[in-house]
Image: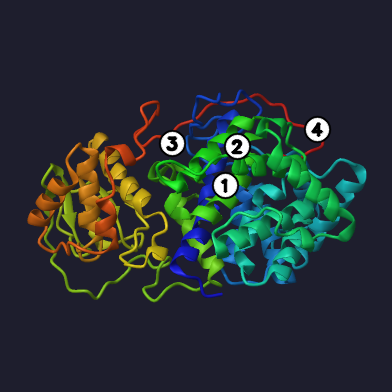
Amino acid sequence: MTLTTAQTDRAAGVLLASAAGDALGVPYEFNHPPSAAELAEMKGGGLGNFAPGEWSDDTSMAIAIAEVAATGADLTSAEALDAIASGFLRWFNDGPPDIGIQTSAVLNGTAALAAPDMPGIAEVMRREAAAYSRQHPHSAGNGALMRTAAVALAHLDDRERLARAARLISELTHADPLAGDSCVLWCEAIRVAVGEARIQVTAGLDLLPDERREQWASWLKEAQTRPAGDFRPNGFTVVALQAAVAAITSTSLGEPFECLHLQDALHAAVRIGDDTDTVAAVAGGLLGARWGASAVPWRWRRAVHGWPGLDGRDLVSLATLAASGGMSDGLGWPVSDVVEYEVQVSAASAPHPHDEGVLLGTHASHAHNATAIVAACRIGRQQPTFGRAQVVVESRLIDSDDHADNPNLEFLLYDAADAIRGLRSEGHMVLLHCVAAEQRTPSIAVAYSILLGHDVEDARRVIQSSLPSTRGRGSVWDAVGRLSLSTTGEHPNSPTPGGRHGDNEPTKPQCQPENHDV
């Protein structure tokens, strides 16, 4: 499937937002959730004593799926299912600090019977899951649903194949048909959101068996009409899905940026309580599919990390490859260590007129003393522009006059400027760059001036004077003119600049539902 720029952004947001929800929920799992007046924070701790920003088993198991999807594999094939099962065992054998009861039992049983690289390992795992289900009547836990967002990315152009893949991968650990149903419903909702930029949680009802379709329609209606707090305990896959739906559909579109719905709904998901990391991870998969990676704030993008040594940028890469059938773009992004640009531009960088600790440059600006980079173009892991900088924040701002390419345009400008402000507060000298410093770099520089309290027209004038490459026109340049201190998402009751992005988190007691997987 060939994706548009906006669809690629939405696909990239699936894993990233799911991991953000996971890391936000970690501290509150089976503990006291944030109150209505509080924001969730990525403090770490939790049942696995995770580091701040570290994701849990929800995202780790999704990565085992995404790694296979990123090769372009058909996830319904025996080879792909074996590879996914092998990935689950690799994670299990690495000793995860927190793992659900049912998943642990199935993987432990599988590991006793077969090596991870054995052909047919998926069938062995499926038999173990079926045996567990026969012995435990209430085995429709949420452990398959929590990881299923990764499945959705592999077959965005084939809803029937996607539904089969969702059920087959669910059955690797969860044989109960309700677990498979929940995965089918969520994968189809994600597929629709990536393709059409809308949330329709009932889109997959026709993909379910006739005998359960009416019951699921009733459950989904409940989720959209009852208070979100009603859906706990939520270890049962039906209630976990209802909780995620309720958090999303009961949260209004964001103000002043609609895409703040992603952040607000994730906070709402965590506030429901109980299995907070799973509910928020599930919600994040659909929210990312609707609003895109560009709606995930820089603090969350920078903070999230986890097994097997990956970070937020790796999630974007895996999701992008999975959605594109394993293909990188013409510049080698997102797999190339260095994205090569043939555009001949100045290698000089200029100090920001309102803050000399911020440098404005291009992809060729290599000679600088910056300790942090804010990049508004495609980059690799070892881009020469980085110099000696160890901190890199990427912005998904597109140099295009087609509004469809930047659906979250004003938020992106604010978020990139807020990244500069945040990095400066940490003591960094920051290099802001795009490819040619014609539209993106100067526009973000103006947005930064606005955050510092300067008038937009004055900021435009001095930026154009300091950065002669500034084009002074285009949709991105025009959009920054619509920003002001009253429209940048500054909220006085917020714990961090920008209002909704937390970057810390707490701990929780050991009390899991006996039969519903966590």
Name the kind of residue labelled 2 in the image: Ala
* Label drawn at residue 269: 2
* Label drawn at residue 514: 4
Residue 454: x and y, percent? 17, 40
Q: Dot 1, crowdedness within 10 Å: few (<14), some or many (≥20)?
A: many
Q: Dot 2, crowdedness within 10 Å: few (<14), some or many (≥20)?
A: many
Residue 425: x and y, percent? 25, 34
Name the kind of residue labelled 1 in the image: Gly
Circle 4 — which element? loop
Residue 467 in the figure: left or right of residue 125: left
Q: Say if 462 sits above or below 438 in the image.
A: above
Please tell me which of labels 4 and 3 falls first in the chain. 3
Q: What's the colour scheme?
A: rainbow
Instruction: Report, in whole angstroms, how far the alpha carbon at label 1 lies from the one at label 2.
Output: 9 Å
Name the kind of residue labelled 4 in the image: Glu
Asked whether the residues under the numbered discs 2 and 4 touch, taking CB atoms below 8 Å apart as contact, a structural biologist would say: no
Q: Residue at x 77, y 40 (%)?
A: 236
Please tell me which of labels 2 and 4 falls first in the chain. 2
* 1 vs 4, front mark: 1
Name the kind of residue labelled 3 in the image: Arg
Asked whether the residues under the numbered discs 3 and 2 touch, taking CB atoms below 8 Å apart as contact, a structural biologist would say: no
Please tell me which of labels 1 and 2 falls first in the chain. 2
Residue at which label 3 appears: 500
Asked whether the residues under the numbered discs 1 and 2 touch, taking CB atoms below 8 Å apart as contact, a structural biologist would say: yes
Q: Residue at x 10, y 50 (%)?
A: 462
* 2 vs 4, front mark: 2
Quarter of the image where the N terminus is located:
bottom right
Please tell me which of labels 3 and 2 falls first in the chain. 2
* 4 vs 3, front mark: 3
